[in-house]
Amino acid sequence: MAFARLAFKVLLILLVLLIGIGLVLPSHTTVERSIVIHAPPAQVFPHVNGMRAFHAWSPWTDIDPETTYTFEGPDTGVGSRMAWQSGNQQVGAGSQEITVSQADRQVTTALEFGGKGSGTASFFLEPAAQGTLLRWEFQTEFGWDLFSRYVGLMLDSMIGASYDKGLRTLKLRIEQPAT
């Protein structure tokens, strides 16, 4: 009986600690990657300003060839939308829609992950000495979801490599176009 009481106290202390730590963890997370592309912003912008164009170099396209993609709205700019559905848990289901489009400067999209969260992704284009500095940023809010706050600590390691891969693919696509 004494062991059960001690085990209960230890579990209670651990639970209080987990909740307490979760409450002080950040309620939002940002993942950011960037690359210099040897082309002017006007040449880079079309590759991020439409969901079909994004799909052509997206780092997630190759994960599950069976994924179903649906495109809606205009081909480019605000309202360009892509939805996806996959049986692969790495891909899942969701949608992405352009909400901000500033020519040669910025594109922001709203992301929905099939009831498993949401966020925004933005592309920022800045003229650079050798072409364009393209910054890709993902932001999400967790609110009071303590479990998601813990996941937020690992988000960079979960999607950062995919962002790097996508940016490298886009760089090659622009700098070495197919002939």
Image (cartoon, helix red, strand yellow):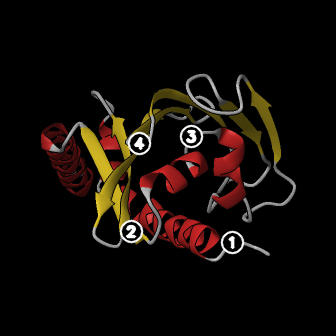
Instruction: State if disc 4 and disc 2 touch (CB < 8 Å).
Output: no
Residue located beneath label 2 in the image = 35
Instruction: State if disc 3 and disc 2 touch (CB < 8 Å).
Output: no
In the rendering, which numbered label is found on residue 122? 4
Q: What's the distance in space between the residues labelled 2 and 3, CA to CA?
A: 17 Å
Q: What's the distance in space between the residues labelled 4 and 1, CA to CA?
A: 24 Å
Residue kind at label 4, given as amino acid type: Ser
Q: Nearer the viewer, mark 4 or mark 1?
A: 1
- Residue 26 lies in what quarter of the image? top left
Pointer 3 local density, CA inside 10 Å: few below 14, some 14–19, many at least 20: many
Image check: 82 left or right of 125? right
The front one of 17 and 11 is 17
Residue kind at label 1, given as amino acid type: Pro
Q: Nearer the viewer, mark 2 or mark 1?
A: 1
Image check: 157 left or right of 59? left
- Residue 174 locus on image (x, y percent): 59, 67
Residue located beneath label 1 in the image = 177
- Residue 20 locus on image (x, y percent): 13, 41
Residue located beneath label 3 in the image = 49
Instruction: State if disc 1 and disc 3 touch (CB < 8 Å).
Output: no
- Residue 111 locus on image (x, y percent): 53, 34
Secondary structure at badge 4 equals strand
Residue kind at label 2, given as amino acid type: Ile
Q: Considering only order in the chain, which callout, 1 or 3, is on the residue closer to the N terminus? A: 3
Pointer 1 local density, CA inside 10 Å: few below 14, some 14–19, many at least 20: few
- Residue 96 lies in what quarter of the image? top right
Q: What's the distance in space between the residues labelled 2 and 1, CA to CA?
A: 18 Å
Secondary structure at badge 3 equals loop
Q: Considering only order in the chain, which callout, 1 or 2, is on the residue closer to the N terminus? A: 2
Residue kind at label 3, given as amino acid type: Asn
Residue placed at 74% from the left, 65% from the top?
62
